[in-house]
């Protein structure tokens, strides 16, 4: 009986086509509740002499079957490995395709263009810290703690009284403190506002602010530089409007709006259905700001402006949702 079981099991093992079939045979014959285990349990009913002989035969059969099962398993594993290696095979003698070239982010491209433009106009490009003091971000810009204008900028406050800068104007303050007039400077960089994110608002975005301090600077000088800027960026004449605007650090202050280039002025989510996009607040520097930075407003005056780089990029390339710019989606970025 035992020899017949061994022979039939070996034949079944040879005919198996999958590892699952092989495992089923192992459980059936060699498992805890398998055929050999059942025979082993019956050995206690036999006389001692027969029990010893049957035990030897049982161990020999078990070893033979285990060896056959392992050999067949190894064959299956070898075939599977060969198939996997064949699928993963790589010819190492083929030349490498080379490094995949990246590209500059559209915000970086626009920033570099504007920096080149203003350098050609005699402006210096300044940089400053993103973690700012309350003084440089607000007080030195004529925005004291009780000023209503602070409500216009929802701020990320940090421990110790510092904050994430809400604009790049603090860089201009530091420039006025460090350098003597006459001054021409721009300050591009990342800024932060605690705002609800939608198609036209982000909590993290980019600005570029500029300032010119000299003698007898007028609104005419301001308009000249702003028209020069917009013509250079859009490579065409764009429709703009100048309307009065209030900003504590300029007096008088203006809002320069651009007709929406996404919808052509018919109204969309970017322009909030108005047909216009606030692009460039500007004005003549408030004498208080000059005085707080150690510049005599009786001798010097100037203009300042703030440009939303992120919104400018949206207008330049027709991007209808600001969230794309920080999505990290390479499919979007490869377009530029």
Image: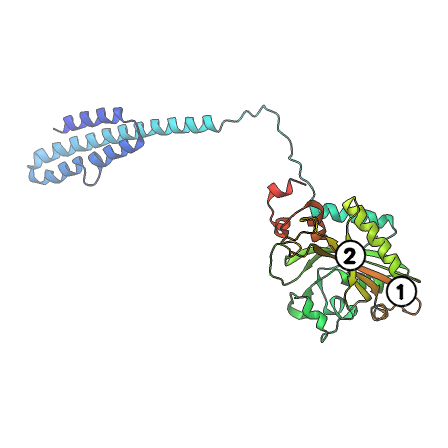
Q: Secondary structure at mark 2?
A: strand
Rendered image quadrant of residue 63? top left
The answer to which of 150 and 30 lies nearer the viewer is 150
Residue 188 on image: x %, y %:
76, 54
From mark 1 to mark 2, how far is it between C-alphas?
24 Å
Q: In which quadrant of the rendered view does residue 21 lie?
A: top left
Q: Say which mark, if any, is on residue 198.
A: none
Q: Residue at x 83, y 48 (%)?
A: 117
Q: Quadrant of the C terminus?
A: top right
Q: Nearer the viewer, mark 1 or mark 2?
A: 2
Query: Is residue 227 shown to the viewer in this render?
Result: yes
- Figure check: 173 above or below 230: below
Q: On the rendered structure, is 228 left or right of 27?
A: right
Q: Quadrant of the N terminus?
A: top left
**Residue that label 2 marks:** 241
Q: Which residue is mark 1?
A: 301
Q: Is residue 277 left or right of residue 19?
A: right
- Eyeballing the image, is 95 above or below 38? above
Q: Are marks 1 and 2 in contact (CB under 8 Å)?
A: no
Give whichever of 146, 125 is nearer the camera. Answer: 146
Dot placed on the residue nearer the N-terminal end, 1 or 2: 2
Residue 16 x, y percent position in the rendering: 27, 27
Total number of numbered labels? Answer: 2
Residue 151 on image: x %, y %: 68, 70
Q: Is residue 174 visible?
A: no
Residue in the foreground of this view, choosing between 302 and 49: 302
**Mark 1 residue element:** strand
**Label 2 neighbour load within 10 Å: few <14, some 14-19, many 20+:** few
**What residue is rendered at 18% in x and 26% in y?**
8
Q: In x, y percent, where is residue 108?
A: 72, 47
In terms of depth relative to the viewer, which is nearer, 17 or 185?
185
């Amino acid at each position: 009986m035992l020899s017949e079981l061994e022979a039939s099991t070996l034949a079944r093992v040879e005919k198996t086509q999958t590892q699952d079939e092989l495992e089923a045979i192992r459980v059936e014959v060699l498992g805890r509740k398998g055929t050999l285990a059942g025979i082993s349990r019956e050995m206690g009913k036999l006389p001692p002499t027969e029990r010893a002989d049957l035990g030897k035969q049982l161990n020999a059969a078990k070893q033979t079957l285990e060896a056959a099962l392992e050999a067949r398993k190894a064959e299956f594993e070898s075939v599977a490995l060969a198939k996997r290696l064949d699928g993963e095979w790589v010819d190492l003698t083929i030349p490498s395709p080379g490094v995949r070239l990246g590209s500059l982010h559209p915000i970086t491209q626009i920033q570099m263009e504007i920096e080149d433009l203003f350098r050609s106009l005699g402006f210096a490009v300044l940089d400053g810290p993103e973690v700012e003091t309350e003084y440089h971000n607000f007080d030195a810009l004529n925005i004291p703690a009780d000023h209503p204008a602070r409500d216009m900028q929802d701020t990320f406050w940090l421990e110790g009284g510092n904050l994430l800068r809400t604009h790049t104007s603090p860089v201009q303050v530091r420039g006025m403190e460090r350098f003597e007039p006459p001054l021409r400077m721009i300050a591009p960089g990342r800024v932060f506002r605690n705002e609800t994110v939608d198609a036209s608002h982000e909590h993290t975005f980019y600005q570029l602010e500029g300032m010119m301090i000299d003698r007898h600077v007028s609104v005419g000088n301001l308009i000249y530089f702003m028209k020069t800027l917009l013509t250079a960026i859009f490579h065409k004449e764009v429709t703009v409007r100048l309307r009065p605007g209030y900003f504590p650090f300029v007096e008088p202050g203006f809002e320069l709006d651009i007709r929406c280039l996404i919808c052509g002025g018919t109204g969309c989510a970017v322009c909030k259905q108005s047909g216009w996009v606030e692009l460039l607040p500007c004005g003549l520097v408030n004498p208080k700001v000059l005085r707080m930075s150690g510049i005599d407003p009786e001798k010097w005056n100037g203009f300042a402006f703030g440009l939303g780089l992120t919104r400018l990029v949206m207008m330049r390339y027709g991007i209808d949702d600001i969230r794309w710019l920080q999505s990290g989606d390479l499919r979007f970025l490869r377009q530029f």
